[in-house]
């Protein structure tokens, strides 16, 4: 059990009548990036805040490296760091002052604190901005300073709460590189995100959260295959043939066909059978669909077979929850 | 504007290098946790840095006290004591207490504006002595109280205040005042954590501070007041604080008042300190 960085059972947090977190079980293996994926208001931040000892759970229990967050908060605090959704640095102070302040608070003496702060500023490319107030930093710089502050005492577990929300693509890539480096050093990262792409790239396991509950859990690959083997994307030359193509694809693949916004594009889910040789069956089905289209005299400009994106997975999973609720 | 441009230019030059990052991730021996005193002083240092970067916040410990002193000296001086200089000998210690005690409410405002920011979360996840964050605010504020006291003393001296107690008596008076205000501020750290907005903190502060400071012996001798009011003035800790400070600056010593000040200061710290920490841990 010591190999688990985080373990929660039936974790609950209610704000008034709303159960923001409604019985969440998590098991996060140490030394990995674990993604918590969900839309706004799903309860991601509330989970993180309970695990970081910022919020008291109303029910269930949560352990960080075997230490209970309620009974041994100090043990937990010694092992974790948090980079919140809003910059967890003091905007009025300079970058250098922020890092010296935190270095002093984790126990470095004056000289060592300054040395450590300068070392981190250099590593995160902030040395020239060291003497400027953080409120003048760009979003990317602020985020780097924030992460720098979080790894000041090399935590065993780092919480990153939506670390790339609001960043430009370049800064986002930098944050991803930093996360990978931090994990390769041995730190466990719990990453919350609204972006499936981000979870897909960084996390080795993902929990999908919606309305305070885990609706799916597994590796990115498992999540994708749980929804279907893949999808066929087709582009036609003549938009007038689209209705016919839709009919052919639906008959051939037996699934639901989506008409894209582009008047010549269609996407069809390939069901597969999940018998171990799914991939081959998927390819056979796709090939049959292509032949059927050709036989029907439909001109195809572009035909591709891909794994479903996590976006499709996510939408499929959340739709399912909505359906279940309407039934209930 | 030049700041923004240099900062942007700097942003463009950052390239990620795993090697440099690996180097900072291996910092050698992890330091020992700081002592409660060291953590508190570090937060005190933060408060001082804030004053350095936002010096406007010293406005309320300079302009406000000067205004109070001038206003009340000339408003009441002639009527109450025959001359403003005469009245000043009585009023100055009182107006000093009143101004500084009123300034304490900014502690609550500062706490309240900070908690909505992410940095507060970071402090709360550090394995440090829990009250140190709050003590840090109060240490910074103690500096502000000292500045306010000195400003009022300066104005008083210019206007003709001549304390019998000399340098030692005045210094002792200011010391007692700042120490009591430090204790008194725990009320505001509590409200700062409890209330939702800066405005409500200000509102509650005014409701508490106006009666406490005006219904006291700051302006006049309570003997002329009706009995029910005298009763309140007599148990009001601010009256005793004024009595103690006035005695010290006058070169004397009032044991009753000093005992009251000490007891109420300790009580406020224990009760409101505990409530503050309860809220701090629960948020």
Image: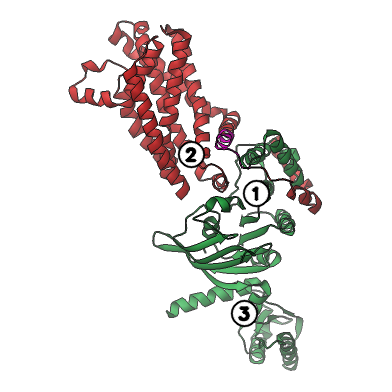
**Magenta span of residues:** B32-43
Tell me the quadrant of the picture where the N terminus of chain B can be found: top right
Residue A141 point in image, percent of width and height = 69, 46
Give the residue furthest to the bottom: A295
SS of the residue under disc 1 = helix
**B122 relative position to A225: left or right:** left
Residue A173, by quadrant, is bottom right
Q: Is residue B211 magenta?
A: no
Q: CA distance from mark 2 to mark 3?
A: 49 Å
Q: Which mark is residue A227?
A: 3
Q: Nearer the viewer, residue B165 or B120?
A: B165
In space, the residues marked 1 and 3 are separated at their CA atoms by 36 Å
Q: Chain of mark 3?
A: A
Q: Please tell me whether residue A53 is drawn above or below residue A287 in the rendered image.
A: above
The answer to whether residue B191 shows anywhere in this view is: no
Task: Using the image, tell me which numbered label, if any, was put on residue A150.
Answer: 1
Residue B114 appears in the rendering = yes
> Which chain, by letter, is red?
B
Which of the 4 quarters of the picture holds residue B74? Answer: top left
SS for dot 2: helix
Residue assigned mark 2: B111
Q: Residues within 10 Å of mark 3 (few under 14, many from 20)?
A: some
């Amino acid at each position: 059990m010591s190999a688990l960085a985080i373990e929660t059972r039936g974790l609950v947090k209610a704000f008034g009548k709303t159960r923001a977190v409604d019985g969440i079980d998590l098991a996060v293996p140490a030394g990995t990036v674990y993604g918590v994926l969900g839309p706004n208001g799903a309860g991601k931040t509330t989970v993180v805040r309970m695990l970081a000892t910022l919020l008291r759970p109303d029910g269930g229990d949560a352990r960080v490296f075997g230490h209970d967050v309620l009974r041994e908060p100090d043990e937990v605090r010694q092992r974790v760091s948090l980079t919140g959704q809003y910059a967890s640095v003091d905007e009025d102070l300079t970058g250098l002052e922020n890092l010296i302040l935190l270095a002093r608070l984790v126990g470095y003496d004056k000289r060592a604190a300054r040395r450590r702060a300068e070392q981190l500023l250099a590593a995160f490319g902030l040395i020239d901005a060291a003497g400027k107030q953080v409120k003048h930093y760009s979003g990317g710089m602020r985020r780097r300073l924030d992460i720098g502050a979080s790894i000041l005492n090399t935590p065993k577990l780092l919480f990153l709460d939506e670390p790339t929300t609001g960043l430009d693509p370049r800064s986002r890539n930098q944050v991803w590189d930093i996360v990978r480096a931090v994990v390769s050093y041995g730190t466990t990262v719990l990453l919350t995100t609204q972006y499936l792409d981000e979870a897909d790239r960084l996390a080795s396991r993902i929990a999908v959260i919606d309305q305070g509950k885990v609706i799916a859990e597994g590796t990115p690959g498992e999540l994708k295959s749980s929804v279907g083997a893949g999808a066929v994307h087709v582009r036609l030359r003549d938009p007038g043939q689209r209705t016919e193509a839709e009919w052919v694809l639906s008959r051939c693949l037996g699934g639901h066909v989506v008409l894209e916004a582009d008047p010549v594009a269609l996407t069809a889910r390939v069901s597969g059978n999940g018998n171990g040789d799914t991939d081959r069956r998927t390819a056979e089905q796709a090939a049959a669909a292509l032949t059927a289209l050709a036989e029907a005299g439909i001109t195809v400009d572009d035909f591709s077979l891909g794994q479903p994106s996590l976006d499709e997975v996510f939408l499929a999973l959340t739709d399912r929850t909505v359906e279940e609720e309407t039934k209930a | 504007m030049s700041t923004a441009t240099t900062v942007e230019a700097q942003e463009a030059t950052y390239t990620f290098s795993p090697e440099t990052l690996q180097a900072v991730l291996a910092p050698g021996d992890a330091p020992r946790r700081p002592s409660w005193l060291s953590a508190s002083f570090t937060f005190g240092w933060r408060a001082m840095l804030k004053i350095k970067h936002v010096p406007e916040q010293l406005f309320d410990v300079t302009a406000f006290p000067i205004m109070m002193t001038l206003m009340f000296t000339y408003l009441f001086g002639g009527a109450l004591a025959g001359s403003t200089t005469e009245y000043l000998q009585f009023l100055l210690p009182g107006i000093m207490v009143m101004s500084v005690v009123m300034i304490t409410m900014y502690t609550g405002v500062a706490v309240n504006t900070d908690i909505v920011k992410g940095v507060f979360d970071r402090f709360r996840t550090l394995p440090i002595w829990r009250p140190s964050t709050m003590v840090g605010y109060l240490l910074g504020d103690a500096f502000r109280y000292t500045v306010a006291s000195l400003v009022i003393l300066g104005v008083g001296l210019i206007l003709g205040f001549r304390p019998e107690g000399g340098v030692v008596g005045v210094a002792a008076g200011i010391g007692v005042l700042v120490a009591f205000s430090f204790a008194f501020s725990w009320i505001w750290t509590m409200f700062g954590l409890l209330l939702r907005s800066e405005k409500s903190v200000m509102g509650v502060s005014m409701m508490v501070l106006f009666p406490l400071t005006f219904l006291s012996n700051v302006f006049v001798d309570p003997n002329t007041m009706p009995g029910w009011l005298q009763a309140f003035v007599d148990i009001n800790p601010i009256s005793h604080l004024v009595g103690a400070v006035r005695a010290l600056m006058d070169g004397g010593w009032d044991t009753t008042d000093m005992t009251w000040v000490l007891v109420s200061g300790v009580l406020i710290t224990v009760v409101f300190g505990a409530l503050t920490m309860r809220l701090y841990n629960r948020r």
